[in-house]
Image: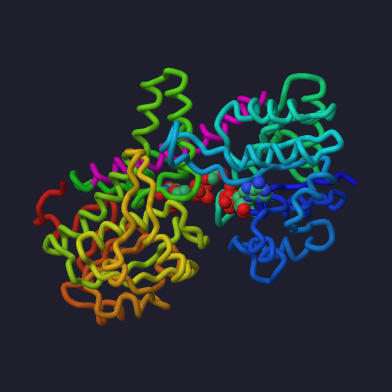
Amino acid sequence: MVKICCIGAGYVGGPTMAVIALKCPSVEVAVVDISVSRINAWNSDQLPIYEPGLEDVVKQCRGKNLFFSTDVEKHVYEADIIFVSVNTPTKTRGLGAGKAADLTYWESAARMIANVAKTDKIVVEKSTVPVKTAEAIEKILAHNSKGISFQILSNPEFLAEGTAIQDLLNPDRVLIGGRETPKGQKAVEALKGVYAQWVPEERIITTNLWSAELSKLATNAFLAQRISSVNAMSALCEATGADVQEVSYAVGKDSRIGPKFLNASIGFGGSCFQKDILSLVYICECNGLKEVACYWKQVIKVNDYQKARFVNRVISSMFNTVSGKKIAVLGFAFKKDTGDTRETPALDVCKGLLGDKARLSIYDPLVTEDQIRRDLSMNKFDWDHPIHLQPPTSPASIKHVSVAWDPYQAAKGAHGLCILTEWDEFKELDYEKIYESMQKPAFVFDGRNIVDVARLRKMGFIAYSIGKPLDPWLKGMPALA
Ligand code: UDX
Ligand code: ADP
């Protein structure tokens, strides 16, 4: 029986291993983590992350061929294949601060593997890492090998949150990079054998190590770049009277471009896009490719611009101030169907509104009040000025934040309502009822283009949606900075 161990029971490690266990009954999978609370949660009825379909898969396999444990060393010792799926945040201090990936967790995992291993191991990079990380890891392992053979593979994960299980069950491709030596190729074949149990062979791509590492960063950069492109267009649409949804539909009909990832929004969030682009920028700079670095950096700059533009639009529409006004915020997660708030654009929008002294009432179906308060009071790293931290929301401003249990309560007595996450339930709300309960004039700012603004305007709302022809009311408002 092949034994797999995955170090790191997070958003990537947990779901990926659960699906491997489901599809490969003859493989024993152990997911290990240093966080006791995370492992306890994986072993309970309340899994530490929400992912449609995940609970089902875990329940089918847990205790049979899927185990969650804090006994990291035991499972590493026993495993034939070790996936490393630890966090790789952006460095916040020292060399490369603001751009380079922080490989502290990776390095400590590699040293631990070298210490514990007594038999040959295949070590698989699962977390996104800068190109050539495998080389560094190889060195750590080789210098501590005591005669054991370690083969490093890069097998980046392309799952998206909210659709992780579907993405894993039916991936566009599985990418495996390895050394072009006989031992390296044997390791590639071994890992391929695991995926081949459910993924058609033509979708399993094998490459050299560096191509696999770079493909992951490149994919995320391309995806994020599409969003910044359509968001940049949304600003131009508002200025000219074009409709960004019509434009992106027409553009997406070109089969060379395709329709996906062209929804204008308040900006992209999530744990990957910004981090991976910063990492890409850093690699370019380290290789003397200044123009290439600038090109990719601009994708993040446009993303920040889009968030700031939204905040400015809200404030300028409401007579240039939201001071003391109640604003209902619908949605705080970085996208629908997840409770994850990492790099959520909602946080920057909320901070912007609080900066103008708004009173916020926030509702999100999955994000807890604790999480919202924690996010607002945390120092946020300022990627553009690496020695600075954006200040946390001041205690005085935090007093102006309340968290509501339902959207109607959030909207009651509010002057304005901002939709910041595209939850399906926000499409179906009784907006007549909401209108009645709000101060007049009542404003809606749809940051995800999910509601029918024409219908809302008929009800009496002054309604704004990203990249759409402006409400006649807003046309008279001063130009945005
Ligand atoms: C992303 C990649 O899609 C995935 O392949 C990779 O493994 C991890 O990073 P994820 O962060 O889970 O996945 O979310 P994704 O669905 O890509 O969305 C990222 C952000 O872009 C979200 O904030 C989303 O709301 C936003 N987005 C997405 C848009 O604003 N417009 C779009 O058209 C698509
Ligand atoms: P991702 O989204 O990439 O899965 P997460 O932050 O959700 O990232 O998960 C990474 C996990 O890795 C965390 O639960 C963290 O506790 C765990 N981790 C980090 N370093 C180690 C280590 N040396 N040994 C075991 N687990 C680790």
Up/down of 113 relative to 18, above or below: above
The answer to whether residue 478 is left or right of residue 216 is left
The answer to whether residue 349 is left or right of residue 88 is left
The magenta region covers: 208-237
Nearest the eye: 354 or 410: 354
Based on the displayed image, in which of its 4 quarters is residue 228 positioned? top left
Residue 66: where, in percent of width, then height?
79, 57
Taking the spot 65% from the left edge, 62% from the top edge, the residue there is 53
Residue 223: where, in percent of width, then height?
47, 39
Q: Residue reaching furthest right?
A: 1
Q: Can residue 449 be found in the magenta stretch?
A: no
Nearest the eye: 252 or 376: 376
Q: How many marks?
A: 0
Q: Can residue 234 be found in the magenta stretch?
A: yes
Up/down of 481 relative to 409, above or below: above
Is residue 69 visible in the rendered image? The answer is yes
Taking the spot 57% from the left edge, 28% from the top edge, the residue there is 131
Residue 218: where, in percent of width, then height?
51, 32
